[in-house]
Image (cartoon, rainbow, N blue to C red):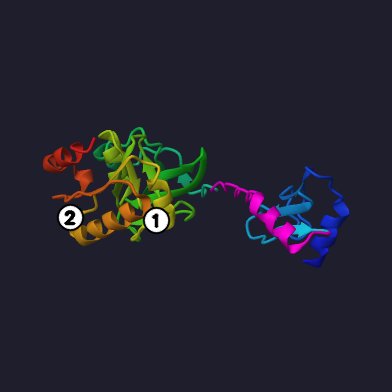
Amino acid sequence: MNSVYKYIEDLDLSEGDTLRCDCPDCGGKNTFTANKVGGAVLYNCYKLGCKISGIQTVGMTAADIQAVMQNIPKPKPKIEAMTIPSHVIMSTDNSYFVDFRDKWDLWDQGLMFDLKDSRAVFPIFYKGVLIDAIGRALRGANPKWLRYSGKADYFIAGTSSTIVVVEDVISAITVAKLGFTGMAILGTSISDAHMSQLENYNSIVVALDPDATHKTLKYRQEIELWTGVRTIALRLDDDIKYRLESDIESLKEYL
């Protein structure tokens, strides 16, 4: 760490200067940034696994340092793209894959195919970058749903101001086709990341599977308390992706 301090001192940055270069600690190529503001140098390495970051000051009081730290925005984390495994291909005429795509009307979802495990693979993008994917087993592989990078907190489909919280990707796509935004939580609990996304919507509907009624009511309460957004708990007769007429009509009341 002392070598990093010495490295920053030797940069001799002027006020307002920003420098991007190789990291002096991990050696990452062009991943280290240093920015001088208010007499302090804010530095950070964006390479995954490198923990070098902080603020270095010269000739400043504790009060000066605190003021600088409060006024300098935190660096935004770099979006790391997922590397697609070689056994995941962009298209296939595999009969299991084609039947699955046709059954759930997924022609427009950019599905990929996992040759190794025979999975339909749903890509997950963040700000235009592929960060994760989730694969659905088509021939009994375990687990039934497989995450490929684990970087995504949720799967979003649709652009409505009303969002429907569901459990799986197919259900999220189903409600999006009905005119809502669908959020698949990709797990068994609601996290801070889910809440941060949900607070961007005008209204929220929680529509989990019928065997998760208690969880539906719990999530509704937690979401509304966190976000302050009107949240509805919708009691379903079946998983929403099966498009039971009574469930579809109940859901459409909130469009």
Decide if residue 184 is on the left or right side of residue 3.
left
Please tell me the numbered disc located at residue 210: 2
**Image point 32% across, 37% down: which residue?**
106
Please tell me the numbered disc located at residue 17: none
What SS does tag 1 mark?
A: strand
> Is residue 79 covered in magenta?
yes
- Can you tell which quarter of the image residue 252 is in? top left
Q: CA distance from mark 2 to mark 1?
A: 23 Å
Q: Residues within 10 Å of mark 2 (few under 14, many from 20)?
A: some
Most foreground residue, 169 or 122: 169
> Is residue 253 covered in magenta?
no
Q: Is residue 47 visible?
A: yes
Please tell me the numbered disc located at residue 146: 1
Looking at the picture, how far across and down is residue 20, in whole percent? 76, 45
Residue at the bottom extreme of this rendering: 2
Q: Is residue 121 visible?
A: no
- Which residues, given as a range, are shown in magenta? 59-82
Most foreground residue, 40 or 149: 40
Looking at the picture, how far across and down is residue 132, in whole percent? 47, 49
Looking at the picture, how far across and down is residue 110, in whole percent? 41, 36
Quadrant showing the N terminus: bottom right
Quadrant showing the C terminus: top left
**Image point 46% across, 53% down: which residue?**
148
